[in-house]
Amino acid sequence: MMKKILNTVDKGLTLFEEWSIFLMVMTGLLALFANVVLRYAFNYTLAWSEEYIKLVLIYTTFIGLSVSVKNKSMVKVDVLIQFFPKTRFPLIVFSNLATIVFSLLMLVYGWKMAIQQASTGQTTIIMQIPMVCLYALIPLMGGLTLIRTLQVLYQDIAAEKAKKS
């Protein structure tokens, strides 16, 4: 039952993560390409394209964290595991628990920052996007990372149980 729920959540999150990152990067590349063509062919630049590229980098960094957790491709120091192979599972659990704490902090404090930013009514300089939209990425990243880490932790525990039996 739990595995079926995790698979359903995984499919939905994967669809959201991959398509949103794909669309952001592709529109960013198109905007950047158009800006280069306009700059060198017509001596005209799009002021908004550079700001949009910054927003794309911010978005892909934050949402890409949950993708890296899902794919187990986060940067980790595994020297203890190499020297002491029996510590592998406890260190993996510790690493996942540390990531859970981090994602909870991002969820809670990111939410507070987004609410605070909503009260100011600030917008980006050129595109006039409300800053609360950017700050809302922090709790979104925290929530997605929390879900992904819980999934990975469940998979690691299940794999360890299967290995022992």
Image: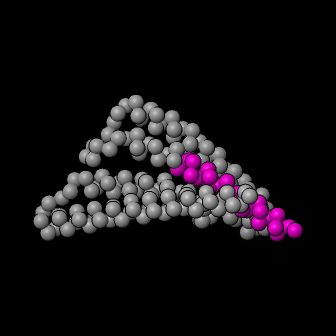
Residue found at x 77% / y 62%: 158
Provide the residue span drawn in magenta: 141-165
Locate residue 113 relative to residue 97 in the image: left or right. Answer: left
Of residues 94 and 59, the one drawn nearer to the viewer in this rendering? 59
Q: What percent of the width, then of the height, locates residue 35? A: 22, 62
Based on the picture, tell me whether residue 149 belongs to the magenta stretch: yes
Based on the picture, tell me whether residue 3 belongs to the magenta stretch: no
Residue found at x 73% / y 69%: 82
Q: What secondary structure do most residues of the magenta stretch adopt? A: helix
Q: Residue 69, relative to residue 110: is it above or below? A: below
Q: Residue 4, relative to residue 144: is it above or below? A: below
Position of the C terminus, as image quadrant, is bottom right
Locate residue 78 relative to residue 87 in the image: left or right. Answer: left
Residue 152 visible = no
Q: Quadrant of residue 151?
A: bottom right
Q: Quadrant of residue 7?
A: bottom right
Q: What percent of the width, then of the height, locates residue 115? A: 46, 34
Of residues 43 and 2, the one drawn nearer to the viewer in this rendering? 2
Residue 160 visible = yes
Locate residue 102 relative to residue 46 in the image: left or right. Answer: right
Q: Quadrant of residue 36?
A: bottom left
